[in-house]
Image (cartoon, rainbow, N blue to C red):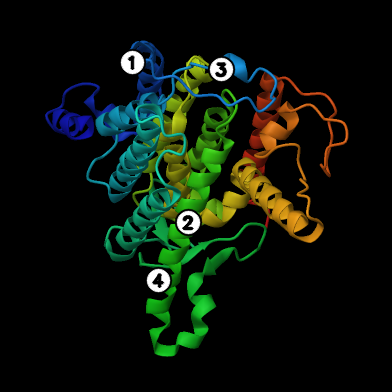
Amino acid sequence: MLYDLFAYLDSIDIPGAGMFKYISFRSSMAIILSLFISTAIGRRIIEYLQKLQIGETIRDLGLEGQMQKKGTPTMGGVIILIAIVVPTLLFARLDSIYTGLMLVTTLWLGALGFIDDYIKVFKKDKEGLHGRFKIFGQVGLGLIVGLVLLFSPDVVIKEKVKVLDKGAKIERLGSVEKKSTKTTIPFIKNNNFDYGELVEWAGDYKQEAAWVVFVLMVIFVVTAVSNGANMTDGLDGLASGCSAIIGVALGILAYVSSHATFASFLDVMYIPGAEELVVFAAAFIGATVGFLWYNSYPAQVFMGDTGSLMLGGIIAVFSIIIRKELLIPILCGIFLVENISVMLQVSYFKYTKKRYGVGKRIFKMAPLHHHFQKPSAPGSNVLWNFPKQAIPESKIVVRFWLIAIVLAVITIVTLKTR
C-alpha cells in the first residue's frame, strides 16, 4: 500500500521517498510495526477477552503448574493475525502473487482456528470444530495454493543463475524463467529434485502428472505442518517461540532465493519476486516475538487454535513458495517430533491393548512436551519413564527453543553443505 504511494513520491523527487524501494528498509519497518502492534494493542485485546470471560478450560492431568492456568484468556492468536496482516498490507507490494498467497493463508487458517476456539469457548463444546472440518479447511487451502502456483504466470524459477561482475555492469546469465515442479533436497550436490521424476511412467503426460503430485504434496505439507504447530501449542511460549525462530530461518532462505547474486553463489534456485516474502517474514517474526511479551511463562493469554493452526500453515506455504518444503523435517523438527510422539503413543497403546488386554504407553504423556512436565508414577506401564521428576515448564520451553535454533542453523547450513 505505502510502496505505491512512495514510488509516486519518489517519481516527483521527494527526498527520502526512494527508501521504500529497498527490502531492508521495508522489512525493518514491518518488524518494528508488528512488534508495536502485538505488544501495545495486545494488552487491549487481552483486557477485552478477560471482560468477555474467555478463559481456558483446564482438565487436571497431573501436570506441574497446570491448574494455575485455569481462566487464562484464549483466542490470543487474533493478536498475531493483526500484527502480521497490518504491516504486510502497509509495507509489502500488494501486486505480488506471493504477498497475496501469504495473506490468504493467514486469514484462512486464522478464521478456521477462530471458529474452533469460538465453539470451545462460547458453545462450551470441548471438542471444538470437528476434526474432519479442520482437515477440509486445511486441504482446501493447500489446493488453492497448489493451483495458484500451477496456473499463475508470475510464479517462475531460474536455475543455475550466474552473476558476472564486469566493472560497473553486472550480467546475469542462466536458464530462462520457467514454470517448474522442482524443489530443494538437503545434503545433495545437485540438490534440485523434480516431482516429475516420480511419474516417469506417465509418458507424454509426465508434465501434467508432475503437477498433480506437486499439488498433492502442497496439500500434505500444509495439513501436516499446521497440525504439528497445533500439537506444539501446549506450554507457555513454546509454539510462538519456535515459530519466531523458524521465521528467521525462512526469511534468510527467502532473501537468498530472491537475490540473483546470492542464488548464484549458493547455487540455489533463483525465484524472482520472492523478496516480498522477506517483508512478510519480518512481520511474522515481529508478531510472534511480540506475542511472547504476554505468552511467555506465566502466560497472560493463550493463542488457541486461532494462532497455532495459522502459524503452522504460514510456515508450510512460505516453505513451498521458496521451494524448500523438503527442508521442513529439519527446520520444523520440533513440530515433527511432537506429531510423531502422539502417533506413536496412540498406536502403541492400541497395539498393546489388543495383544495383552492392557494398554501400555511409550511416553508418560503425549505430545512430547507434556512427557517432561509429568512426574513418574510408580508401577506405571510406560516404556520411557525418564526423567523421574517433573521439569519446570519454563525450562522445558527454553530447551525446546535451543533445539529449534540448532535445527534452524542446520537448515541454513544445508545451502552450502552438499
Mark 3 or mark 1: which comes first in sequence? 1
From this view, report whether residue 178 is shown above or below residue 1. Answer: below
Q: Amino acid at mark 1?
A: Leu
The residue positioned 27% from the left and 47% from the top of the image is 96
Nearer to us of marks 2 and 4 is 4
Q: Is residue 297 visible?
A: no
Mark 4 or mark 3: which comes first in sequence? 3
Which residue extends farthest front? 357
**In the rendered view of the protein, which quadrant contains the N terminus?**
top left
Nearer to us of marks 1 and 2 is 1
Please give the residue where the numbered disc 2 appears in the rendered image: 323
Which residue extends farthest left? 12
Please give the residue where the numbered disc 1 appears in the rendered image: 52
Please give the residue where the numbered disc 4 appears in the rendered image: 211
Q: Is residue 307 left or right of residue 147?
A: right
C-alpha span from label 2 to label 4: 14 Å
Q: Amino acid at mark 3?
A: Lys
C-alpha span from label 4 to label 1: 47 Å
Q: Residues within 10 Å of mark 1 (few under 14, many from 20)?
A: few
User: Which quadrant of the view contains residue 5?
Assistant: top left
Secondary structure under tag 3 reads: helix
Nearer to us of marks 3 and 2 is 3
| Callout count | 4
Q: Which mark is residue 69?
A: 3
